[in-house]
Image (spheres, helix red, strand yellow):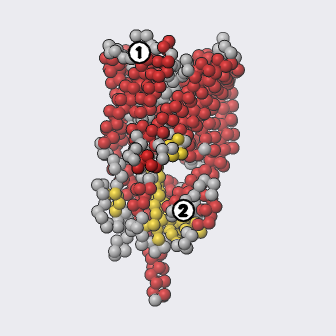
């Protein structure tokens, strides 16, 4: 009762109508979706520096506390025409280290302390994980950390985004006494007391703990030249004050 | 059938989950908390209602040979729209639902209702039938989520209900309720209760 | 290599499609009356998963993802078609199922007789679409990981339906409370099996 010609024309029209409708919807809603993603990113950055924010006030708080944000390269020089906030780490991580854009966010909180917030992204057992880590102005200690992963069934996912896990990083250091970069290890079965370069692994999540450890080390190591610059300037300030 | 009846039979005697055994796939994983379950229920209701309406409007023009493809395209298009809207307006919930929004496409309720109802009936009754089935499905989802969130996390819709003093006296949230198996067992219990109230629903041996 | 092995074990046992995500429940409940048919369906699902998941992965990576069209030229680098992924995935699945059916019918009539009736069912099996969506969501790095995940999920699903059918064959002779008969006990059984499968979670990978 329906000819082949009818069927072909019918499907062609259907595909066109559907494609047009979906494109219109997607284009219309894209600004709102991108805004949501921006707000989420702002909230994560603020959270690593212990600033609570809600969806509503995130943008204001971000503009208030994150005073500057810039992008450096591996040599530690600033890249003038790159935007730190818009830098997509999943793309940067696939480039060679020397070509990566490395974002740095500078936060000044209510008590006037200056923190450097650095982003990182890696791979857990079940998909991507990412996070932000805040360092004191002399880079000696970690003042806060925030990790996240894509949400799936609760209880099955690795619990790296809990306060209990994240707060372990506070007070740890990524440099040893000689000032060499050693990162922070995630130790299965519990970190030894007083070890400032290790935290306890999450239970039952060996691969994710390993992935997190790799993420911290690989995410921070390209910044070493930048770290050196900061520490040089801090120590020269200290000497001039004395 | 009257409009009211079209809407109300899927809630109990023709419930898509507990009687028709349709559409269990995409839904149980979102019943850990009430809020995602409500959003999911709403999304499914919108998709069933409108796909029923659209297919019913088109029913005389669809060539039978490509019937299934046409249905799938209509459903998929609606689901994409729902997904985009969720991402734009309730971002936190859409993150929790993750892939399960996409899986509404293969939710058998929708295909089932299209085949069984919308292909043969007028648009308005089809729309109501879709609405009713969506709500009947959502109802089960919400009941399951209610118990799982209350017993599993001691809260409802994200608000803590069990007072802190209970915890001090030794009350503990039942962590088991959060895990997937309890969703299945909760549904089993719902079926048990529903069928003991309506003995004519009991399956013959 | 170690990573792939982990992924395989995990997708078969721990993140089992049926017990952890409730995917493919409709056909799981409907076709598990006897062991023989469920073996057929299980094999068909694994087979189709193994073909559709890598194809959809390639489509996602080279057509849909943000910047995926960069190979066409720099002016396409900013295009993001990921909103079309649901509709393309389901279209690919439907087309491949159809194709597989025709190929099997032509080249292996015995296999067709065994699997044939199940193939159309599979197009709307949530486990198939679910696998493609999980791959997109979890950002698997390469086609090797994708194939391993697909086979693992398929085998996990196969295991689930076959063992469930075996239990169901036995339970036919048991004395079950009337309202629980059939569907009710099926849900509770699946829940208990899921509890069993959860013990694999203790395996640290």
* Relative to C38, B124 lies left or right: right
Foreground: disc 2 or disc 1: 1
> Mark 1: which secondary structure?
helix
Q: Quadrant of residue A81?
A: bottom right
Q: Are marks 2 and 1 on the same chain?
A: no
* Relative to C175, B194 lies left or right: right
Q: Position of residue B19 (x, y in %)?
A: 50, 19
Q: Quadrant of residue B119?
A: top right
> Mark 2: which secondary structure?
loop
- In this view, the residue in front, B140 or A55, is B140
* Relative to C103, B78 lies left or right: right
Q: Position of residue B50 (x, y in %)?
A: 66, 27
Query: In the rendered view of the protein, which quadrant contains the N terminus of chain A?
Result: top right
C-beta proximity under 8 Å, tags 2 and 1: no
State how many labels appear.
Answer: 2
Is B120 drawn above or below residue C27 in the view shown? above
Q: CA distance from mark 2 to mark 1?
A: 58 Å
Name the residue: 50% across, 39% down: B33
Q: Position of residue C119 (x, y in %)?
A: 46, 21
Q: Position of residue C21 (x, y in %)?
A: 44, 34
Residue A182 in sight: yes
Q: Dot 2: few (<14), some (14–19), or many (≥20) neighbours within 10 Å?
A: some
Residue C88 in sight: no
Name the residue: 42% across, 64% down: A170
Q: Dot 1: few (<14), some (14–19), or many (≥20) neighbours within 10 Å?
A: some
Instruction: Report the disc number at residue A51.
Output: 2
User: Which residue is disc 1 drawn over?
Assistant: C178
Dot 1: chain letter: C
Name the residue: 62% across, 23% down: B132
- In this view, the residue in front, A174 or C172, is C172
Name the residue: 45% across, 86% down: A239
- In this view, the residue in front, A48 or C8, is A48
């Amino acid at each position: 009762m329906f000819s082949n010609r009818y069927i072909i024309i019918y499907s062609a029209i259907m595909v066109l109508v559907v494609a047009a409708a979906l494109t219109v919807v997607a284009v219309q809603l894209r600004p709102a979706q991108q805004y949501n993603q921006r707000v989420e990113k702002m909230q994560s950055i603020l959270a690593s520096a212990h600033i609570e924010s809600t969806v509503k006030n995130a943008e204001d708080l971000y503009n208030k506390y994150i005073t500057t944000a810039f992008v450096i390269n591996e040599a530690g020089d600033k890249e003038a025409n790159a935007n730190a906030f818009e830098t997509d780490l999943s793309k940067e991580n696939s480039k060679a280290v020397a070509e990566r854009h490395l974002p740095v966010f500078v936060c000044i909180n209510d008590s006037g302390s200056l923190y450097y917030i650095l982003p990182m992204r890696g791979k857990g057992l079940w998909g991507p994980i990412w996070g932000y880590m805040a360092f004191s102005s002399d880079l000696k200690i970690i003042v806060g950390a925030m990790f996240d992963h894509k949400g799936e069934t609760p209880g099955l996912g690795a619990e790296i985004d809990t306060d209990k896990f994240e707060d372990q990083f506070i007070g740890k250091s990524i440099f040893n006494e000689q000032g060499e970069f050693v990162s922070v290890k995630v130790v299965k079965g519990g970190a030894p007391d007083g070890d400032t370069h290790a935290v306890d692994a999450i239970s039952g999540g060996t691969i994710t703990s390993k992935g997190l450890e790799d993420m911290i080390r690989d995410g921070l190591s390209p910044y070493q030249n930048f770290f050196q610059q900061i520490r040089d300037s801090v120590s020269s300030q200290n000497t001039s004050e004395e | 059938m009257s409009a009211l009846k079209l809407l109300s039979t899927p809630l109990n005697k023709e419930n898509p989950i507990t009687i028709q055994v349709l559409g269990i796939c995409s839904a149980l994983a979102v019943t850990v908390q009430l809020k995602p379950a409500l959003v999911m229920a709403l999304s499914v209701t919108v998709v069933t209602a409108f796909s029923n309406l659209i297919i019913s409007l088109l029913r005389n023009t669809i060539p039978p040979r490509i019937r299934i493809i046409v249905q799938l395209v209509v459903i998929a298009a609606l689901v994409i729209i729902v997904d985009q809207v969720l991402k734009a307006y309730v971002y936190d919930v859409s993150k929790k639902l993750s892939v399960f929004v996409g899986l509404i496409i293969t939710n058998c309720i929708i295909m089932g209702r299209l085949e069984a109802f919308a292909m043969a009936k007028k648009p308005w009754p089809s729309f109501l039938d879709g609405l009713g089935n969506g709500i009947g499905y959502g109802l089960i989802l919400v009941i399951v989520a209610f118990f799982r969130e209350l017993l599993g996390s001691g809260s409802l819709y994200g608000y803590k209900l069990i007072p802190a003093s209970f915890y001090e006296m030794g009350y503990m949230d039942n962590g088991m309720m959060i895990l997937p198996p309890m969703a299945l067992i909760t549904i089993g219990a719902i079926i048990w209760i529903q069928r003991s109230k309506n003995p004519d629903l009991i399956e013959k041996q | 290599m170690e990573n792939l092995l982990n992924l395989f074990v995990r997708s078969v046992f721990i993140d089992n499609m049926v017990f952890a995500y409730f995917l493919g429940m409709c056909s799981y409940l409907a076709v598990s009356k006897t062991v023989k048919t469920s073996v057929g369906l299980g094999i068909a699902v694994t087979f189709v998963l193994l073909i559709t998941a890598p194809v959809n992965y390639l489509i996602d990576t080279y057509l849909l993802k943000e910047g995926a069209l960069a190979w066409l030229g720099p002016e396409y680098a900013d295009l993001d078609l990921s909103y079309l992924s649901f509709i393309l995935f389901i279209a690919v699945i439907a087309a491949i199922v159809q194709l597989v059916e025709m190929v099997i019918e032509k080249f292996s009539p015995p296999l067709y007789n065994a699997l044939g009736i199940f193939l159309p069912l599979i197009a709307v099996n949530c486990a198939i679409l679910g696998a493609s969506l999980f791959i997109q969501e979890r950002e698997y790095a390469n086609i090797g990981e994708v194939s391993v995940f697909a086979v693992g999920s398929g085998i996990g699903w196969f295991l689930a339906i076959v063992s469930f059918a075996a239990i169901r064959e036995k339970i036919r002779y048991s004395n079950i409370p009337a309202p629980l008969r059939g569907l009710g006990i099926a849900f509770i059984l699946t829940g208990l099996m899921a509890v069993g499968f959860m013990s694999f979670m203790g395996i640290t990978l």
